[in-house]
Amino acid sequence: MKNPKRFEIWLVNWNPGRGSEQEGIRPSLIIQTDAGNINPNYPNTIVVAISTKGREVPFHIKVKPSSTNGLKSLSFIKCEQILTISKERLVEKIGTLEEHYLKLVEEALKLILSLET
C-alpha cells in the first residue's frame, strides 16, 4: 500500500473521468492529515487537483516548477477541486510542495469551504 504524506505531490490516475473531471495521469496535492494517510484501515486520501491551466483567482495557487516539487511546468493548485480518492489511484510521488506555498493553500481551502480564517 502507498503511504502519502500531507503536502506531497503525487501523480494520480484519474481514468475514467466523468464530465469536467480530470482525466489521465496528472499531479495532485495530498491535503489529508498524516494520521488519516497512515491508517491501515482507511484506504483513501484527500487531494486537490493540479493543472497547467488556471486563473488569477484566490483559490488557484500558482506554483513554479522545481526539483523539490517535481512539477515540470508552471502549474496551479486548484483548491476548489477537492476529492477523496482511493490510494490505488496514486501512481508515484513526484515531490513535496515548498514551505512558502503551504499557507497559501491552507488559506485558499478555507476560502473555498467558507471556513473561518
Image (cartoon, rainbow, N blue to C red):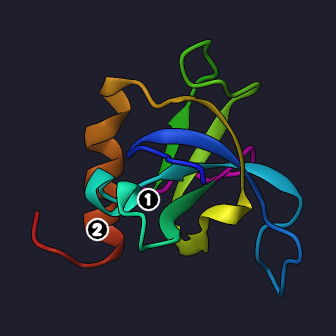
Residue type indicated by callout 1:
Phe
Which residue occupies the foreground of this view, 53 or 36? 36
Q: Position of residue 96 (x, y in %)?
A: 49, 29
**Which residue is pictured at 55% across the width and 74% down the height?**
83
Question: Among all residues in the image, which is located at the extreme bottom?
Answer: 19
Q: Which mark is residue 111?
A: 2
Q: In this view of the protein, which residue sits in the foreground, 34 or 81?
A: 34
Magenta span of residues: 50-58
Quarter of the image with the C terminus is: bottom left
Query: Magenta stretch: residue 62 in it?
Result: no
Q: Is residue 87 left or right of residue 84?
A: right
Res. 59 mark: 1
Near mark 2 (Cα within 10 A), the count class, few <14, some 14-19 or many ≥20, is: some
The image position of residue 40, as x and y in percent, is: 42, 64
Residue 56 seen anywhere in this rendered image of the structure? no
Tag 2 near tag 1, CB within 8 Å: yes
State how many labels appear: 2
Relative to 106, 5 lies left or right: right
Q: Residue at x 48, y 56 (%)?
A: 57
Residue situated furthest top in the rendering:
67
Indicate the position of residue 77 as horizontal and vertical percent values: 55, 49
Q: In which image quadrant can residue 35 be found?
A: bottom left
Residue sitting at the far left: 116
Answer above or below: position of 106 versus 93: below
55 in magenta = yes
Tell me which numbered mark, 2 or 1, is placed earlier along the sequence.
1
Query: What kind of residue is marked 2?
Result: Leu
Q: Tell me the quarter of the image containing the N terminus.
A: bottom right
Q: Residue at x 63, y 43 (%)?
A: 10
Q: Classify mark 1: residues with Cα within 10 Å, few (<14), some (14-19) or many (20+).
A: many
